[in-house]
Image: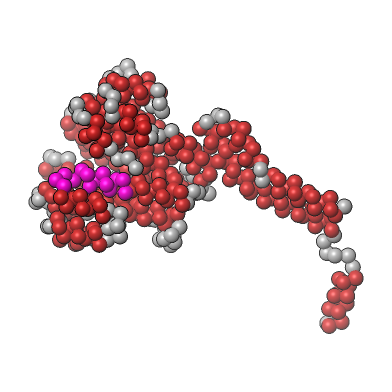
Amino acid sequence: MSVVLANATQGAVSAEPAIPATAAAALAVGLAALGAGYAERGIGSAAVGATAEDGDMFGRGLILTVLPETLVILALVVVFLTL
Amino acid sequence: MNTLTEQNQGASNYEYVIARIRSRQASLFDDDDYRKLVRMGTAEIARFMEETEYESEMNALGSRYSGVDLVEYALNRNLAKHFDDLLEWCDGRLYDLVARYLRKFDAWNVKTILRGLYSGADREEIEDDLIRAGEFSDRELEQLLAAEEIAEVVDVLSNTMFEEELTAALEDYEDTGTLVALENAADRAFYETLLAGLPTNVESDSATGLYLEFLRGEVDFRNLRNALRIARSGADIDPSEYFIDGGRLFDAEEMNQLVGSLDQLVEHIRESTYGEDLDDALDDLADADALIEFEHALDAALLEYADRLSNRYPLSVCPVLSYILAKEREVDNIRAIARGREAGLEPDAIEQELVIL
């Protein structure tokens, strides 16, 4: 039993990390996109409400809605760092 | 009509609703508008309103009414439009919380129809006096309007929140031939559903908790008004008949004792949680002759409380509440101005009647 465990830890140390760097970067982008999507959900519905009341709000609402998109763009930087 | 649970499923859409009501709240009349309005004649008020929010209602009703009646009907219709919108937008828990309060217009409509039938008014007159802001749909109101006697109205209202109370009061009506019991029953039905089935485990400092506190305050203030009126008029009425359960200010027994003496009643309020907010108003009450100023003070205190809440909890039911109250106040104010000008009151006298923050 202890031999197996020792082998396993030795193997893990010497082998590749469980998540390769590029996969981790991809994960980071994915999570950031998830966060951005959640943020946009609230802002978007508020923007639609404001636009419904006053059509001039469309432009401003659009800008505010896509602001959290910067999160994803920043996360993309991580991808370039790992490449 | 039994939408009590129908729309309560799913998540609330606070962001959408609040963005819309904030925009509408911004277009309410401000101090300057009121100052202009109190100096206008009735025809000028009507013309002024045609250039604002109320344009479409004024145009729609303009051919049938004129003067103050036109203003009044346009106000009611506009109020109904906005509050109906609110119910349409809200989802989930938010709908439940908002509908609780707006059902007061259902109670109003039921009372209007009962009174109309009782006084023998024709259908059209009754229809014009309805405020279609509550939960009843047009079809349901149509059924109520089609009823030809009071028992029929009560029958149509079975399966609604009014069923139990109204059926009980119908007997009383048939014995005495007066509407008081039925009107009372409609109000009681509203106040009972107002607090029924509310979540009990909300934190008292959360937005929902504070809203519930407001609803309880509403019940308290209603009890308070009734108590004051009974105490002041000295009428021989059993206060417990008018007592509404659920408030924090007093229970039925206390109210029975307190209506005996105005001084004791005022003292009791002063020591309660509302004492601080109403301190000045209570001083006025002690030496004023009329209750009306105290009632205005109650309204202003509620409005201020709601405004404070709406800024503290921007994504909750509180801004919606604040908007509903502000809109109601605006309609009341404009109506007071129009009626006051018609009666030839001085601008200063009218300004006293307004509730402005």
Is residue B42 covered in magenta? no
Tell me which secondary structure the magenta stretch mostly adopts: helix
Q: Which residues are magenta?
A: B288-301
Residue found at the far top of this picture: B63
**Residue at the spot 79% in from the left edge and 50% down from the top edge:** A77
Q: Quadrant of residue B179?
A: top left
Is residue B297 covered in magenta? yes
Quarter of the image containing the N terminus of chain A?
Answer: bottom right
Residue A74 screen position, x and y as percent:
75, 49
Front-most of A4 and A31? A31
Q: From where the camera sits, is residue B254 visible?
A: yes
Front-most of B101 and B30? B30
Residue B109 screen position, x and y as percent:
29, 36
Residue A69 screen position, x and y as percent:
69, 44
Q: From where the camera sits, is residue B69 visible?
A: no
Tell me if residue B130 comes above or below residue B269 in the rendering: above
Please give left or right for residue B352 compared with residue B103 in the image. left
**Residue at the spot 24% in from the left edge and 59% down from the top edge:** B270
Please give left or right for residue B21 compared with residue B182 in the image. right
**Residue at the spot 60% in from the left edge and 36% down from the top edge:** A61
Q: Quadrant of residue A2?
A: bottom right
Number of numbered discs = 0
